[in-house]
């Protein structure tokens, strides 16, 4: 239960990708990892190192005997979740209401965001170039239309006209959304030159169920993987059994919108870390490629549990179930990066940890999503497997996971990292 409560606290402290990256870095620094400035000479001395780039965080542990003959053992995840970002000119007034103009980020389940108290969270950039993290607390809500005013049988929501949240009543002296952001950030509104702010449900996570075995919270896609990879890395380091490979935590931003950014998996951030670490260890270009050939990556992202009310959406012979163990994801069209060899490697890690495992493959009539796995495998040529904890209500404002799955997933990731 301690790990579950720690996950809930971690999610609460991570209302945006920028917060999540900072929380991971702070916890690693508290454990002895050293911050790396990207503009400074690269540090590959034995021990832990961590770097934050926007909403992404990279960490690497260099063993005492690391050399160009080592490889990299990588756990990749992502810090972002679907929601609604604040538009550049967000201050709206309509019919006596003050509203916030928002743009859809990723693929949120729209109806799940109705009638929830929302915060705007992320970063503001000031006129002097400094950056501050901010979370406004509950200030916004997207109200549902009363049933008396809509007798139709189906709910149809337009992203532009129906999803702009209210923040209060308009009028002389009323606060706009940017007034609230500036106040919470402790700055003047006119000092804000830019911002990256996204909605987040403010309801805390909850453990519930007949046997207290389920977790309900927002952003579990994919903070479940970020949290599990953080704990796995710390435990692997503490075990003293990590071997000579360099252990890497790579938590990217912008997975929900395609990853094609400087902090996304299609961008250069992981390659920068690996190449600069290899170079600092004495590897030339050829040596770096040999290190890649010795390396592997676990792409850790949430998976689909079978839905009891929509079982026909799943492959009839593959029904991953919450609290049945972490899920190996396979797709013939390479939407996931798992191969026979990397799947076998993952199963060995699960056996070493004493963890049950499950397999997801999509229904041929229902296209599946993708992950950072194929991007990492394609960009770097590193053998990759796609895995994650099973969820219900994926991309809802509030998702559902299993207590045991999260513990098992962390154990399996630790077994992957250590020298077994």
Image: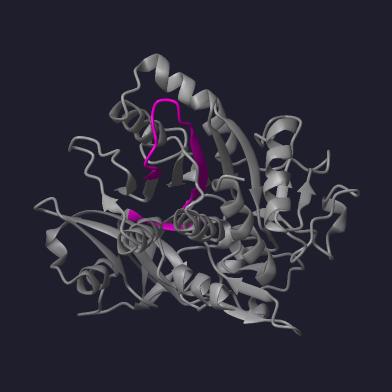
Q: Is 364 situated above or below 95?
A: above
Q: Return the residue nearer the eye: 66 or 223.
A: 66
Q: Position of residue 373 (x, y in %)?
A: 58, 37
Residue for point 61% across, 63% down: 396
Residue closest to the far top: 286
Reply yes or no: does residue 54 show up in magenta: no
Indicate the quadrant containing the N terminus: top left, top right, bottom left or bottom right.
bottom right
Hey, which quadrant is residue 264 in on the image?
top left
Residue for point 51% across, 48% down: 77
Q: How many marks?
A: 0
Judged left or right of residue 363, residue 244 is left
| Viewer can see residue 260 | yes
Q: Is 48 situated above or below 335?
A: below
Q: Position of residue 230 (x, y in %)?
A: 47, 57
Residue closest to the far left: 128
Residue for point 66% across, 67% down: 401
Q: Is 46 situated above or below 213?
A: above
Q: Position of residue 282 (x, y in %)?
A: 31, 24
Q: Position of residue 31 (x, y in %)?
A: 34, 62
Q: Return the residue nearer the eye: 413 or 191.
A: 413
Reply yes or no: does residue 74 show up in magenta: yes
Q: Which residues are magenta?
A: 61-87
Judged left or right of residue 378, residue 390 is right
Hey, which quadrant is residue 340 in on the image?
top right
Indicate the quadrant containing the C terminus: top left, top right, bottom left or bottom right.
top right
| Viewer can see residue 395 | no
Hey, which quadrant is residue 101 in on the image?
bottom left
Residue closest to the far bottom: 210
Q: Return the residue nearer the eye: 31 or 121.
A: 31
Q: Is 213 situated above or below 271?
A: below
Judged left or right of residue 38, residue 205 is right
């Amino acid at each position: 239960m301690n790990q579950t409560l720690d996950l809930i606290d971690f999610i609460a402290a991570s209302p945006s990708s920028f917060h999540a990256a900072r929380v991971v870095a702070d916890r690693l620094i508290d454990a002895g990892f050293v911050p790396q400035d990207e503009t400074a000479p690269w540090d590959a001395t034995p021990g832990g190192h961590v770097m934050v780039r926007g909403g992404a965080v990279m960490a690497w542990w260099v063993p005492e005997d690391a050399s160009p003959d080592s490889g990299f053992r990588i756990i990749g995840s992502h810090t972002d979740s679907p929601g609604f970002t604040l538009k550049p000119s967000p201050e709206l007034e309509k019919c006596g209401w003050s509203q916030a103009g928002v743009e859809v980020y990723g693929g949120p389940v729209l109806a799940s965001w109705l009638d929830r108290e929302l915060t705007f969270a992320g970063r503001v950039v000031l006129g002097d170039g400094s950056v501050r993290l901010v979370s406004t607390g509950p200030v916004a809500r997207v109200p549902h239309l009363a049933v008396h005013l809509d007798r139709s049988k189906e709910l149809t929501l337009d992203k532009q006209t129906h999803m702009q949240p209210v923040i209060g009543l308009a009028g002389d002296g009323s606060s706009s959304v940017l007034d609230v952001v500036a106040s919470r950030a402790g700055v003047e509104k006119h000092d804000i030159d830019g911002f990256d702010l996204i909605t987040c449900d403010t309801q805390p996570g909850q453990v519930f169920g007949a046997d207290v075995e389920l977790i309900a919270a927002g952003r579990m896609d994919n903070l479940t993987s970020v949290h599990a990879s953080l704990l796995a890395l710390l435990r692997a380091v503490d075990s003293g059994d990590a071997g000579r490979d360099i252990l890497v935590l790579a938590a990217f931003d912008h997975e929900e919108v395609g990853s094609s950014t400087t902090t996304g998996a299609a961008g250069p951030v992981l390659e920068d870390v690996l190449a600069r670490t290899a170079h600092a260890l004495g590897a030339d270009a050829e040596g770096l490629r040999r290190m890649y050939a010795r390396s592997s990556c676990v792409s850790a992202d949430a998976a689909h549990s079978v839905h009891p009310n929509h079982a026909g959406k799943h492959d009839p012979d593959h029904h991953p179930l919450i609290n049945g163990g972490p899920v190996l994801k396979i797709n013939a069209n390479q939407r996931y990066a798992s191969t026979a060899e990397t799947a076998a490697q993952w199963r060995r890690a699960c056996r070493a940890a004493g963890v049950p495992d499950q397999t997801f493959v999509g229904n041929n009539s229902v296209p599946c999503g993708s992950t950072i796995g194929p991007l990492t495998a394609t960009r770097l040529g590193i053998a990759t497997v796609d895995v994650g904890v099973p969820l219900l209500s994926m991309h809802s404002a509030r998702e559902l996971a299993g207590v045991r799955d999260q513990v098992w997933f962390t154990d399996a990731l630790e077994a992957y990292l250590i020298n077994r």
